[in-house]
Amino acid sequence: MKRRLIIKENNILTKIDEDAVEELLDFTEYRKKPIVIKAIQLNNEFEVETLEGVMRGDKGDYLIIGINGELYPCKPDIFEQTYDEV
């Protein structure tokens, strides 16, 4: 299933396919700030209550404590691309 960005402006919905988003919108590049978080890779399924609702983690996902003390799950591939052990 192809994902789309839906923008609502003046009660008009514009749908943009995910492969066209970058060429149609004027993105600016940003570098993630070097922050330190705490994390553990769990060997069980788990759920975390967040401000966005309940998020589910699968076996092998990481549980992260963010800079404001918030808990959230992260898939191993994303975690390994984003974080290095300090």
Image (cartoon, rainbow, N blue to C red):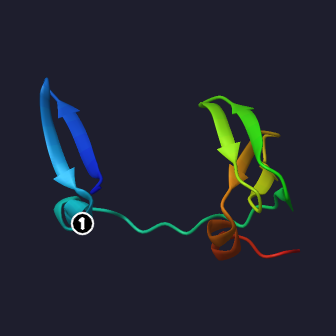
Q: Secondary structure at mark 1?
A: helix
Q: Is residue 57 found left or right of 16 in the rendered image?
A: right
Q: How many marks?
A: 1
Q: Quadrant of the C terminus?
A: bottom right
Query: Is residue 66 or residue 55 the one in the foreground?
Result: 55
The residue drawn where x is 23% and y is 39% is 7
| The image quarter in which residue 56 lies | top right
The residue drawn where x is 76% and y is 57% is 59
Label 1 crowd (10 A; few <14 / some 14-19 / many >=20): few
The residue drawn where x is 79% and y is 52% is 64
Query: Is residue 84 or residue 17 the one in the foreground?
Result: 17
Q: Is residue 19 found left or right of 61 in the rendered image?
A: left
The residue drawn where x is 81% and y is 61% is 36
User: Which residue, given by chain and number where applicable, does mark 1 sit on?
Assistant: 19
Looking at the rendered structure, the kind of residue marked 1 is: Asp
Q: Quadrant of the N terminus?
A: bottom left
- In x, y percent, where is residue 75? 66, 61
Q: Image height check: is 77 above or below 60?
A: below
| The image quarter in which residue 6 lies | top left
| The image quarter in which residue 39 lies | bottom right
Q: Image height check: is 10 above or below 26?
A: above
